Amino acid sequence: MLMRLRHPPLLRGLLQTLALPLLLWLLLLGSQLNFAELFTPGTLATLGKFLADFFPPSHDAFFLKSLGEATITTVAVANLGMLLAFAIGAPLALLSSRVLLGDSPLLLAVLATPIRALLLLLRGVPELVWALVFVRVVGLGSPAALLALGLAYGGMLGKVYAEILESQPQAPLQALRHAGSGRIAALVYGLLPNALPELVSYTVYRWECAIRASAVMGLVGAGGLGPLMDTSVRLLNGGEVGAILLVFMVLVLLTEMVSWLVRKVLA
């Protein structure tokens, strides 16, 4: 047995097997979760009543009016936030990518490296934290969520766009450059047609994420469905929460349909 344990692959596998439960145990300790409190009679009774109130969802006129307005706000914030993210991410992706700058060490050091650092900063801060910052700066409401989405998702789009462009076959781009074409024209005609399906697919995916994120950011005062959900949960109004969750599911379903249609058109 001792001879077997000295075998490197066997020893490595044993250590990995023991490390996983240890890691899970440390995570549970760090989270300070008390599972016993979740299964007390009082907690189970309150949770059961709350879930039972989900059906039927609330449908009184005043609540439906508030729900409709909040839904429109959430979708508008997500769309405008994605437009801002695209306006930030697309130019920064080009300015940080070798497909536009080439292999010039000077351009890569002076231009690409700082821009990549900026993209890292933008996407490294979660959109919820950006929302908290902008709530303090511009106050409660949709502008904070819009700016938070634009900055956080702009960093994500910029990084992924640059990687998609650099992963494409460079031969058509180089052929156009050798034929005397400019950098932008060579990029548009030699590289973009092959990269377009991936670029559009990722953008649609981020749009779907933006709709969910804009609703969550409302919990910190950034407008949309978040404040409505927060109020309903605090009051343990299961019918209203059920209606809001139903709207969430419909929005996600619509984004899935749009994503499917886009992929079908580009296929």
Image (tube, helix red, strand yellow):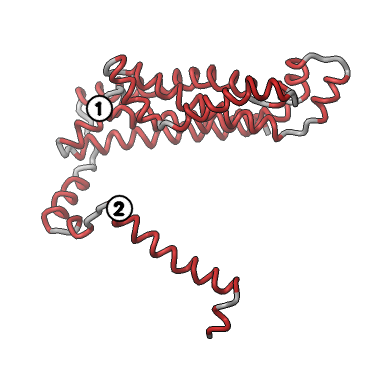
Q: Nearer the viewer, residue 205 or 248?
A: 205
Q: Which residue is mark 1?
A: 227
Q: Position of residue 159 (x, y in %)?
A: 57, 30
Above or below, 47 against 160 in this view is below
- The x and y percentages for residue 27 are 34, 55
Residue lying at the far right in this picture: please name it: 179
Can you say which quadrant of the picture contains the C terminus? Answer: top right
Between residues 84 and 102, which one lies in front from this camera angle? Answer: 102
Nearer to the camera, 252 or 35: 35
SS at mark 2?
A: helix
Residue 79's label in the rendered image is none
The residue type indicated by label 1 comes to Pro
Residue 130 spot, x, y in % from top left: 37, 26
Q: Which residue is depicted at the point 25% across and 25% down? A: 64
- Which label is found at residue 30? 2
Q: Up-down: is 31 above or below 152?
A: below
**Distance (Cα) linking label 2 and label 1:** 29 Å
- Place residue 11 in its image quadrant: bottom right
**Residue at x 53% of width, y 19% of height:** 88
Three-letter code, disc 2? Gly
Q: Label 2 crowding class (10 Å Cα cut-off): few <14, some 14-19, many 20+?
A: few
**Residue under the point 54% across and 78% down:** 5
